[in-house]
Image (cartoon, rainbow, N blue to C red):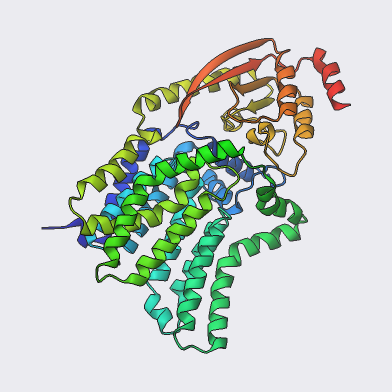
Amino acid sequence: MFKVTESRIAQFICLLAFATLIRCPAWGEWNFGIDDQFYALVGERLTKGDLLYVDIWDRKGPLLYLIFAALALISPTMLTYQLAATGSAALGAYGVNRIARLIATPGSAMLAGLSYLALLSRFEGDNLEAGVFFNTLVIGAAWLLVSRFDLLRRGQIDFGLIAGFMCAGMAIAIKQTVALEGALFGITALLLLARSGQSIPGTAWRGALLALAGALPMLVTGLSYWANGHFAELWNAMVTSNFARGYADPGIRVQRIFTMAGMLGIPMAFAGIGIHALLRQSTPRSVTWLVTLWAVVALALIFSFPNIYVHYAQSALAPLAILCAGYFAHRRPVWPGIAAVIGLSLALSGTLHIRDRWRARPAAAALVSYVTATTPHKRLLVWGAPNYLYAKIGADPVSPLAFSPHLYEGREWTGLDERKEVRRILAHRPETVVMQTPLPSSPLNEATVAMVNSYVATCRKHKRFTIYDHNGEQVHTVFSGCGAEHMLHLHSAWLR
């Protein structure tokens, strides 16, 4: 009788089928997540000649947007991006399965892969979040490292190990904080080489080659921006802006820490049981310890950010899922872990809020239709979440800060003058302003919010729409008939 656990191809097909099943309810929705749709917008802007960090700005790494630009060249539709993300999630789950197989039974390793997919959906990775892509690369790097522990113990490296560190480098080129996970992998490789009896020069050049492989993607990016005279903009986006952002109020930060700890409590508990079980078995302890350290580093990163959001936990999900394999393999009964880690995660994921998913597409279509009709000259300002509206109606964002939270969040820091950018946007006299009510931020940038509020107060019409994202209902007011000639005096006053 054929068993799935005996065929790697069958394992991947099963994981891909599961990923498709739990993610497909959101396929075709362009408004599912605020970050997701911005990645798609930036990718499409790059295909039209915009230069990342100069013509359109964000602080995430360049590879993320190159992925979306490449997909846009194939077909600039949300379904294309979602199919690619589903494939990436399934590949990540397969990598989790392969690593877990080194320390647990085939069946428990498959459950670890399914757990990863379910946890990814629970922590807002059920559509196009960056973690869906960089996690897969990190998992690939981890797999190529742990599968070559014996090679490193002999003081050798091979192309597969170099490729693993290139995967880590590409992950860093999507999300900079992955550098700490990459550093953990690098230190592990160096320690194994050093303990192999290899000479110091031999260890040094091998370690340097692995480090170069990891640094190569960002090194190439830096050199290209240096050559075109925009290295300062790259440095600001990648480094300065991340350290200059304001921290949330202490009370809010503490509340979010406890909320995140509560959300992660279940997978952490079963991972902890799994570690205990694995260390009592005759499994490769070196793999268990590396995955445990990987989880610790990823968890520490979550709580080091200036603000704490649900999707920040995505980097910790792969090692936690791998460690859960120890529970699935060596603790009975298994069903509490399956129900808590997989079942509860799916119950709380946005894609499986079927009522919202059923209403989301027609609601978003109605908004697009109305905005298209009221914006004949394509002068649009999105002042809220649905920034992909620019692409949907064919409008060009006036400012590099097309992601409106960069303009209205009070603790945001981009290196650009937000008030100057809003003055410039309003001087362009947008015909239509799509404003989320209320704006999802606290505190707000009172100066920029006041400018936009004054502008929309003179618009001739307004209409409210309810659309649906992964969090449920979101209310937006569309102000139209704005930017008439009689408003020039008001804008001149602002510009002075």
Q: Which quadrant holds residue 103?
A: bottom left
Residue 173 against residue 384 in the figure, above or below: below
Q: Nearer the viewer, residue 483 or 154?
A: 154
Residue 251 against residue 333 in the figure, above or below: above
Q: Position of residue 69 (x, y in %)?
A: 57, 47
Q: Work out which residue is located at the far right of the displayed protein and give it.
A: 496
Q: Is residue 9 left or right of residue 36?
A: left
Residue under the image location 58 percent in, 48 percent down: 305
Q: Position of residue 241 (x, y in %)?
A: 69, 48
Residue under the image location 59 percent in, 17 percent down: 477
Q: Which quadrant holds residue 121?
A: top left
Q: Nearer the viewer, residue 312 or 423?
A: 312
Q: Is residue 298 left or right of residue 271?
A: right
Residue under the image location 34 percent in, 50 percent down: 269
Looking at the image, can residue 210 be seen?
Answer: yes
Residue under the image location 78 percent in, 30 percent down: 424
**Which image quarter holds the N terminus?**
bottom left
Q: Is residue 392 left or right of residue 52?
A: left
Q: Position of residue 474 (x, y in %)?
A: 51, 23
Looking at the image, can residue 128 be seen?
Answer: no
Q: Position of residue 271 (x, y in %)?
A: 33, 54
Residue 445 against residue 454 in the figure, above or below: below
**Which image quarter holds the C terminus?**
top right
Q: Nearer the viewer, residue 363 or 147?
A: 147
Q: Which quadrant holds residue 330?
A: bottom left
